[in-house]
Amino acid sequence: MQTIKAFNPSLRHHALIGILLSVWGFLFAFFIRPFEHGEMDTEKWVLVSIGFSGFVLVAYLIVSILQKGVYKRRGAWSLFLEIGLYVVFYLIYTMLTYVFYRSSIIQGFYGFGEFLQQIILKIFLVVTPILFIARRYVHTLISKRDDVITLKGDNKLDVLKIKSADLVCISNAQNYVEVYYLENDVLKTKLLRSSLKQMEADTGFLIRIHRSHLINPSHFRSWVDGKTVALTHMQLPVAKNYKERLLSL
């Protein structure tokens, strides 16, 4: 399945998408009133609209957390996973809203099949284009805003600012980590007093290929043999436990 190269797993950015969808959902629910049966006063309909839109936010936050975990484990995102995210999002949202719909607040009388046809289909048609556009924008946002990253060690002077695209890998060096990066296409290194685990958490886009090595997937070039990979201007060993993840690149 096709790999999506420009991908942004940032929970902060995706939380903004969730808020956007929630606001859009509230406006849609309040003015279109897809849940309405009979007459409701304004106060009750505001409550209904808040519930309708709130579940959009909850469902999208759940899939955003799942998305980040999958991306961290696989080190890549594919069209198959992107489609799967939409499916899981709507499954979670449908279950939450159906329970809400049949609750004492709305007292809906549709069965589940009718609920899908009369309500969820409308929501799908309204929310999907906004979700698609917002996700496309957020995926390109990381390459624009997060192009420069700052790596920090425990000491105040342990700071390295580089473009994320120039970061090749980070390796463990006892109480330090050794950062390998490109400067005018020349491979350079810098020691920072930190741990590999901390660097993995701080960057978010590096993948582990060995207990002592994290690599930037964009600098993967080829397999040298079954235990070694070639990166830009260097080679590193691959541990058996992490080989499957690297094969998915």
Image (cartoon, helix red, strand yellow):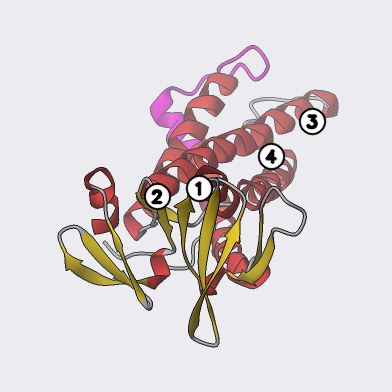
Which residue is denoted by mark 3 in the rendering? 46
x, y percent for residue 165: 52, 73
Q: Nearer the viewer, mark 4 or mark 2?
A: 2
In the rendered structure, the answer to whether residue 77 lies left or right of residue 33 reads left
Residue 41 in view in this figure: yes
Pointer 2 and pointer 1: residues touching (CB < 8 Å)? yes
**Amino acid type of the residue tagged 2 in the rendering:** Ser
Q: Which mark is residue 29?
A: 4
User: Residue furthest toward the left?
Assistant: 226
The numbered mark, 3 or 1, whose residue comes first in the sequence reads 3
**Amino acid type of the residue tagged 1 in the rendering:** Leu
Quadrant of res 144: bottom right
Q: Nearer the viewer, mark 1 or mark 4?
A: 1
Pointer 3 and pointer 4: residues touching (CB < 8 Å)? no
**Amino acid type of the residue tagged 3 in the rendering:** Val
Gap between marks 3 and 4 measured at Cα:
9 Å
